[in-house]
Image: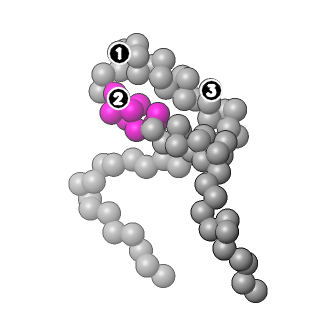
Amino acid sequence: MRRLKVAHDDDTVYCDVQMPVAQGRELLHLVTVLRESGAHPNLDTVFAHMQLELRMSIDIVENPPDWGAAEPTKH
């Protein structure tokens, strides 16, 4: 088993959240409103990353890529 080594001075927080697409759209709207309000300038970059991740995730669910769709399944 490999262990993830984290430096003692690394204070980075990671968050992986899963939700239905409807909630994803609602969260995207909330993050957009918060970002546009300018009330939390220290979180602007975090909000921007959240918006990007949510938009990409929603797009993948609504428009699934057809990678390998022409490839026959091998059993």
The relative height of residue 22 versus residue 35 in the rendered view (above or below) is: below
The Cα atoms of the two marked residues, 1 and 2, are separated by 9 Å
- Which residue, as the protein is rendered here, is positioned at the far left? 9
Q: Position of residue 58 (x, y in %)?
A: 60, 40
Cβ atoms under marks 2 and 3 closer than 8 Å: no
Q: Are marks 1 and 2 in contact (CB under 8 Å)?
A: no
**Highlighted range, magenta:** 43-51
- For label 2, the residue is 43
Looking at numbered disc 3 in the image, what kind of residue is underneath it?
A: Glu
Question: Quadrant location of the C terminus?
Answer: bottom right
* Residue 49 found in image quarter: top left
Query: What kind of secondary structure does the magenta stretch mostly adopt?
Result: helix
- What residue is pinned by disc 1? 38
Closer to the eye: label 2 or 3? 3
Circle 3 sits on which residue? 26
Residue at horizontal 64 percent and vertical 45 percent from the top = 63
